[in-house]
Amino acid sequence: MDYDENNIFARILRGELPCEKLYEDAFALAFPDINPQAPCHVLVIPKGKYISMADFGAQASPEEITGFFRAVSLVAKRLGVEESGYRLLANAGPDSMQQVPHFHVHIIGGKRLGHLLAPP
Ligand code: AMP
């Protein structure tokens, strides 16, 4: 599967669609999820064109991987959920129901989240 240049997050990265930038550096961009599932629900996306975690893990450079995950932990800290805790979630592929084919992680927190999987 090829990277879809017109996926929503690609368009946000190109500035064609708006987002509330919470954090940005050379490797990552963070913005609130448009349909929040918890008091804190923020997406972090890499600047590079990667479809999923599988693609990112296999193809991204060590600098991109390090830079991205450093950004994720920094964003969580700035959101104020480092002490209270948060869930990091990355959907990949059909069974996960990944909607946007640009790798992203959800930082979810701000309340007790319960155990790992909600009923489908
Ligand atoms: P996933 O199912 O992991 O692919 O999650 C995609 C997420 O992107 C969903 O939680 C959507 O609510 C969110 N989303 C879709 N469009 C936008 C947008 N324009 N700005 C912010 N979040 C979005």
Image (tube, helix red, strand yellow):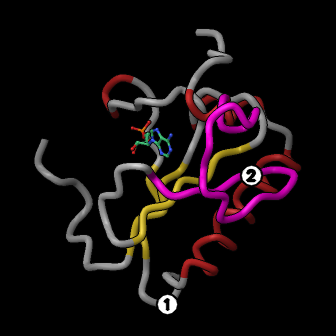
Q: In terms of image quadrants, where is residue 74?
A: bottom right
Q: Earlier in the sequence, mark 2 or mark 1?
A: 2
Over which residues does the magenta segment extend?
11-33
- Reply above or below: 52 against 107: above
Tell me the element at label 1.
loop
Q: Which residue is mark 1?
A: 83
Q: Residue at x 56, y 78 (%)?
A: 79
Mark 2 nearby-residue class (10 Å; few <14, some 14–19, many ≥20) = many
Q: Amino acid at mark 2?
A: Ala
Q: Is residue 31 magenta?
A: yes
Tell me the element at label 2.
strand
Q: Which residue is mark 2?
A: 28
Report the side of 12 relative to 37 (left or right).
right
Mark 1 nearby-residue class (10 Å; few <14, some 14–19, many ≥20) = few
Report the side of 42 relative to 71 (left or right).
left
Frontmost residue, 17 versus 41: 17
Q: Is mark 1 within 8 Å of ligand 1?
A: no
Q: Amino acid at mark 1?
A: Glu
- Residue 12 image offset from top left, x and y in percent: 65, 37
- Residue 85 image offset from top left, x and y in percent: 43, 81
Which residue is outermost to the bottom? 83
Q: In terms of image quadrants, where is residue 5?
A: top right
The N terminus lies in which quarter of the figure?
top right
Q: Residue at x 53, y 50 (%)?
A: 105
Q: Residue at x 65, y 65 (%)?
A: 22
In this rendering, the count of numbered labels is 2
